Amino acid sequence: MPREYTPGVRTVPPTAPRPAEPGRRPLDPTGPAVDPTGHEPAAADLARAAARAAADRLAPPAPVGLGDVVPAPERVEPDPAADFTLPADAAVRVSPDPAARDVAEQLADLLRPATGYPLPVTDAAPAAEGLALQLSAAPGETPGTVAAGVGLGPVAGPATPGPVAELGAEGYRLDVTPDAVRITAATPAGLLHGVQTLRQLLPPAVENPAPVAARWAVPGGVIVDRPRFPYRGAMLDVARHFFGVADVLRVIDHLARYKLNHLHLHLTDDQGWRIAVDGWPGLATVGGATQVGGGPGGAYTRADYRRIVSYAARRHVTVVPEIDLPGHTNAALTAYPQLAPDGVAPPPYTGTEVGFSYLDPDDERTYAFVADVLGEVAALTPGPWLHIGGDEAFKVPADAYARFVERAQGIVASTGKTVVGWHQIAPAGHADGRILQWWGTTGDDPATAEAVRRGARVILSPGNHAYLDMKYAPDTPIGHDWAGLVDVERAYRWDPGTHLAGVPADAVLGVEAPLWTESVTSLAEIEFMLLPRLPALAELGWSPRRTHDWASFRRRLAGHGPRWHTAGITFHPAPEIPWPTTGPTGLPSPRPASQPTTPTADLP
């Protein structure tokens, strides 16, 4: 049975010598010092071993527990006698594979600022000491080629080495011994998820942007981990308020930190069109020139969008672009009035009402427009998904709406992408592989359940649990409450596998947390609404159902306040989370109860 680990308590005498592992010389300097080749070690090796053994006996336990990770890993087996301390001369050794090396470089980039260590990355077989990333595969397989969504059943029994393919496309194994930290995975995505876990196991000071004098200890033991659902994401609405490339990249970093792997960009709406389309240049220059409240708006150039997609891909996050159709199109109609039912250009819209605009579903020019736009966006997007919106087209008759959706689905298929739409597209004819994104609040939707019976899959974004534009409490200074108040506990307490009546767990592709931005105007406000709720949705999407426990989650989440503070990340100090009064490194904790009048990263 795995031993429970209580931070600060060792379950074996700290002075007991550790037995040698196979292929490694004993760590007790009084024992025989023979390396695996049978050669006598150099005096410097003996001195380092003696110094390490002495330091291990005197050092306190690692300040973070092996089980303190968010999202909760599938299996954790702590070994309090096997804590690892990162030495100043450590290197990152990695399998000789370009994709694996890139993950190793990201690990080194994460650790260098706070540690001040050089941490060179070397393409060499992982050694018995230091940091090692190993891209491996089961016999007969090529590393890095495990298909997305592969599930080979539960990893059963003790955490002993087995086929890496059991971990699927995103799983990893992390081994921490007194001399080394090794991350093993079948794919680079799995390696990166392991890196994010290692990041959380280091002291919060690792988030500091400048060198800090600290003992960089990692708790000993083994983690074997993989996701419950293949799709885990968040949505950023850049149409109601425009956010520049740098802000979007920062959001991608937050997703990657918590093993979320999809960023849904809501690129078009009544208030603004946010991506340049060569064949229809007025979409960006005219349709992108405003936003809620009448600000300057903006739009991404093709180069901007490619930069976002590339940055996300390096972090194994897939961008899902949304072109909302046939409603939510006032910005497009302002630029191209021939697409409007009456052929008249509406004035730019800077309010927040919905449901009043739509493309003419009976004009063939509409479908030429849709084909051009979706074709260009698809060509810029390497991921498999293309989102067509489909919600709140209140003024389009039901039969015309169904015809439009069916033709739009066919256009998406012609680009080689899989169509995603809000659950309002459910009554339309089925298209192979189509995905419905469900945002209801009741858990009962017969139309969506029927679409699932016809072959659709579902991404769950229930408005009363997953919508991150909902207020935390009545006095939250920004946000909405039409779906109710969503504090951290409400964001956490639901099960995607059983939430929607008539939709079995195997039809659930995953979860997504949307952030609509009618009232969100800055990066600080984005972060304030994302955190601390985003990790709650991440845990529901990643962790096995049996690990979901509010008491455990709120305790683990509390340790992230000092990390966010150290990194300069804005967050809401939710009163239901037991934030530490003093962080593990002596940093001040978040405000425990009072709601700030404006989002802020400053803590008392």
Image (tube, rainbow, N blue to C red):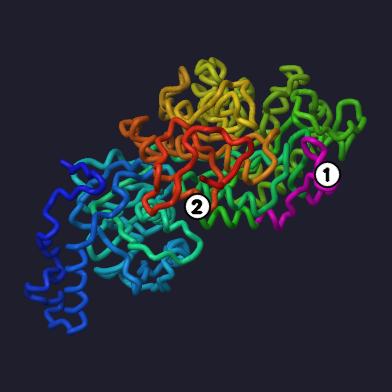
Find out whether residue 280 is within the magenta segment. yes
Closer to us: 346 or 180 = 180
State the mark number for residue 109.
none
Mark 2 or mark 1: whose residue is earlier in sequence: 1
Residue 105 seen by the camera: no
Disc 2 packing (10 Å; few <14; some 14–19; many ≥20): many
How far is the residue under mark 2 from the one under mark 1? 32 Å
Find out whether residue 290 is within the magenta segment. yes
User: Residue beneath label 2, please?
Assistant: 316
Magenta stretch bounds: 277-306
Q: Position of residue 520 (x, y in %)?
A: 67, 37
Disc 1 packing (10 Å; few <14; some 14–19; many ≥20): many
Q: Could you tell me which quadrant the N terminus lies in?
A: top left
Instruction: State the residue at coordinates (49%, 65%).
Output: 210
Q: Position of residue 85 (x, y in %)?
A: 29, 63
The amino acid type, in three-letter code, at marker 2 is His
User: Residue beneath label 1, please?
Assistant: 289
The amino acid type, in three-letter code, at marker 1 is Ala
Instruction: State the residue at coordinates (32%, 50%).
Output: 64
